[in-house]
Image (cartoon, rainbow, N blue to C red):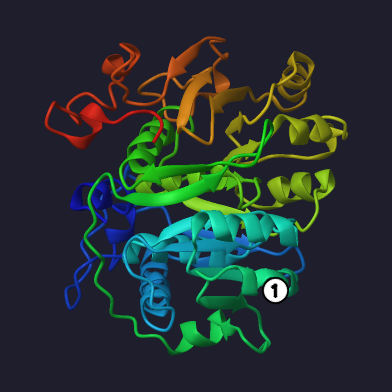
Amino acid sequence: MSLWLRGLVLQALRSTRGVCGPRGQPPPLPVPQKIVAGHRPPNPAFWWVDGMGAEVKWSFEELGVQSRKAANVLGGVCGLQPGDRMMLVLPRLPEWWLVSVACMRTGAVMIPGVSQLTEKDLKYRLQASRAKSIITSDSLAPRVEAISADCPSLQTKLLVSDSSRPGWMNFRELLREASTEHDCVRTKAQDPLAIYFTSGTTGAPKMVEHSQASYGLGFVASGRQWVALTESDIFWNTTDTAWVKAAWTLFSAWPNGSCIFVHELPRVDAKVILKTLSRLPITTLCCVPTLFRLLVQEDLTRYQFQSLRHCLTGGEALNPDVREKWKSQTGLELHEGYGQSETVSSTGAGVPVPGHLHPSSQPASGRASCLSSCPLCDTCQELPCLQGETDNKSPSASLPLSV
């Protein structure tokens, strides 16, 4: 990964030992955004729950250690080299986020996929992408086995499971034994980072490639301006790991020092979501409009969201009645955004006012603002968060919205 991108995407992970931080040196003193007893807010970097009592919490230092171990698995027994492609077909398990960071460390290109992929879908994606490795769970392993003989590029198969399976390497076992020492591969800004397959609405799904720079730049901007994240925030994005919004969360949260919260949610349940928001100190929520439509059908007066301050939505059209019902019953605006598989977050309605970290108490402006530093729009030049951060010599000066 280029030094420039590391400074954007992984700067929060350097706060202690970090993903690429120095070894053998004491961690620097934190610089708190707000003076609260002189300490940085004690939020973890990653917080996962399964709804049945199990949970995983990683500090930024622990995330750094685990990601170095995961990178050694990818570059060691899997033999992945920079530019090699790896399919990630996992439900909302901690390993998805861990392997995503490990891919960045090793220069491997991650290709997320939904767990509902059929044998035909898997075969098409593996053949089209020429992926050399795949990581998945027990439920999908039989489907991969059924078509792997037709995918000559596929060399290694990783299984996220507590049990073994013939022909597969157990990722959790390998992770436990892996070394914690790893040096990030140096990549260039335009080297590939991730590939997403489009929905295939008008034909076969097509591959969309994002570079090492495009996601890092785009989501640092939207993370500050639209998502309004700070070091004290806990951000819950309910999207499936296969969709681009899962990566959007990763790249918008950690550069701003925020915690990513994940609920396994094996199936959509409005009551589970509302109870989780009431019980845990989640400050920022992002759901698709369809899910907000389910939430407003519940009696929201039964729930008290003590910490929730900022709500976002995107991925499809938001009906005005859903926005109005959510606002009337919770007092919180829904800030709608727009983007595509080919882009980052492109526009946002009710974008937070610069200088206000949590503008949920302010009325939505109702107008769209550009969220990316693009050469096609004058709006970007007016964003205070970007002034002084880009110039004609920086990679962002010529970076297109889509790759």
Q: How many marks?
A: 1
Residue 170 lies, in percent from the top left, at 58, 84
Tell me the quadrant of the picture where the C terminus can be found. Answer: top left
Give the side of residue 323 with respect to residue 73, left or right.
right
Residue at x 60%, y 31% (from the top left corner): 312
On screen, residue 71 above or below 44: below
Q: Is residue 263 visible?
A: no
On screen, residue 357 above or below 347: below
Residue 7 lies, in percent from the top left, at 24, 49
Residue 102 lies, in percent from the top left, at 40, 66
Q: Is residue 76 visible?
A: yes
Quadrant position of residue 219 = top left
Give the side of residue 147 with respect to residue 268, left or right.
left
Secondary element at image label 1: helix
Residue at x 49%, y 86% (from the top left corner): 174
Q: Label 1 sits on what residue type?
A: Ala
Q: Residues within 10 Å of mark 1 (few under 14, many from 20)?
A: some
Question: 173 and 310: which one is in front?
Answer: 173
Give the side of residue 333 with respect to residue 267, left or right.
left
Residue at x 82%, y 43% (from the top left corner): 270
Tell me the quadrant of the picture where the N terminus can be found. Answer: bottom left
Question: 127 and 222: which one is in front?
Answer: 127
Give the side of residue 380 with respect to residue 333, left or right.
left
Quadrant position of residue 393 = top left
On screen, residue 119 above or below 316: below
Residue 233 lies, in percent from the top left, at 48, 45
Residue receiving disc 1: 141
Residue ranking furthest to the left: 393
On screen, residue 268 above or below 300: below
Question: 142 and 120: which one is in front?
Answer: 120
